[in-house]
Amino acid sequence: MKSKSLWSMLLLIVAAVLTLSACQSDKADSDPSSGKDDPKASKANKTGMPIVDESLDLEIFANKPAQNEDNDWNDILVWNHYRDMTNVNVKWDLVSPDALDEKRNLALGSGDLPDAFFLSSIPNTDLLRYGKQGVFLPLNDLIEEYAPNLTKIMEEDPSIKKAITFPDGNIYSMPSLIEKDFLSLRLSARPWVNEAWLKEVGMDIPETTGEFYEYLKAVKELDPAGDGKTIPYGGTVIQELIQWLSGSFGVMNRGPSNSANIDVDPKDESKVRFYATTDEYKEMLTYIHKLYDEKLIDQSIFSIEWGQFLANASNNLYGSMIFYDPIELFGEEIGGQYNSMAALEGPDGQQSYNKISSPVWVTDNLVLTSDNPNPAATVRWMDHFYSDEGAKLYYMGVEGETFEEKDGEIKYMDHILNPEGDMTFEQALVKQLTWLGSINGIIKSDYFQGGESAPQSMAAAEKIEPMVAEEIWPRFTFTEEENKVLQSAGEDIAKYVEEMRDKFITGDEDLSEWDKYVETIESMNFEEVVKVYQQAYDRYRGE
């Protein structure tokens, strides 16, 4: 169940808008020079360990996920070991997710700042706002001089630097990354089909939207679960199905990271397109409505809880689903029945897998404040986790204590994989490591031990890889004025689109009202919102 616990936590992470109080305005007049001219800031060894010759104390504010509630980062193997390596002693101010917004708000509002924020869910709007105020330090020069590992990654994939560079030209945070080739993790939940039921209805794995419909229909008629309990397609949210099918209908062609129904115009790739008013999008909703109307989609998909979904799956009620590794979650007997699907070919011959994240998981892995006593050493402290050695330390721990390596294979030791008594894998892991629900640095497939590294999931990713969209955008960054537009008209439009999307699918709103839906969107300061995204895209392209 290790994948479930990690992802259930990650999916609960939400962005928050912070309020800037008067006492912070004093910071606006301070020198935002990243500490370059402060003699303390240069006391860091550029290479090798330790990072500093004399012990450096740092106070870091950190989000502590629920999976980590039984450990204390101030006295745990992974951070104790790293302290001894670096000579940097971190005092962790650990905050639970339910108190994160309030505590972070208090820290920023009072002016009593930590030296850094670690995985604290700071949205881009606030990174820019506090960066311009001088509360958060610009890191451009420090990264260039003291972060060779991150610099190398950004040189290999320029989209990463673009994702963390703001319109004012500054970088205010160091990101959490997924190794670009670790496709299985970037896919997140992926499509599965019950291969045992495919055999019962005499069909092969669906490769087109038409074949998928015929399979769902055949499963419903056969009712292999019995007593009408069979659910041809099930999931935890309708959004997963929509994103999977997007590549079959030619929308969301640059991935889901900019979740505002924006992609690139197929007729002119220098232009963005608002695809939620296109004929292609309407055709996709028409197809999904057909599935829902014929009860081929779980009728409770708009309200189902995770626990109920997992219970249904464990009782073998689903003919297909979009979720994480079935064997890891449901065991071999049930999960072993499933095989993966790739992208379906749509009615117009389009077949692309667009449901894939950018390598930039979050932008705010580490944010340095103006109170930081040694920015150079802090940047070097973080940069280690973008290296192979650092990724191994964070996700695997210390050789001989948490993992062992034999014949080129690295794995956790038996006291973690098979703990004594009633202790679970997760409980044994968090006694010495902190990565559950807390992705840091760069995640590499060689060291990440969640369900996305399981054989079934890796095989699914290999099948999907040839169909992955040509380019996947990270989240764009915006100016303060642009953010004002997005936080008003942009949010209103997004909310209306989602509301109408669900109504079109369920039939609560007839698709004959499509023109009215489009007209309503166009009356909601629509052109200004599209203009904002076009400006962000132009910057992203370097224009």
Image (spheres, grey):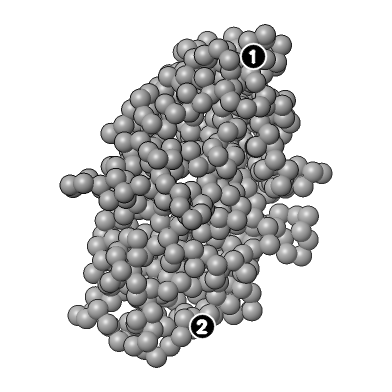
Outermost residue, right side: 543
Against 256, is 32 above or below? above
Against 258, is 280 above or below? below
Residue that label 1 marks = 43
Q: For this rendering, which residue is in front, 26 or 526?
A: 26
Q: What secondary structure is marked by label 1?
A: loop
Q: Which residue is at a point 62% across and 36% down the rendered structure image?
A: 483
Residue that label 2 marks = 210
Q: Which residue is at a point 79% across and 43% down the rendered structure image?
A: 542
Q: For this rendering, which residue is in front, 531 or 95?
A: 95
Q: Is residue 25 visible?
A: no
Within-10-Å neighbours for mark 2: few <14, some 14–19, many 20+: some
Which amino acid type is shown beneath numbered disc 2? Gly
First reached walking from the N terminus: tag 2 or tag 1: 1
Within-10-Å neighbours for mark 1: few <14, some 14–19, many 20+: some
Q: Which mark is residue 208?
A: none
Outermost residue, front side: 407
Against 325, is 415 above or below? above
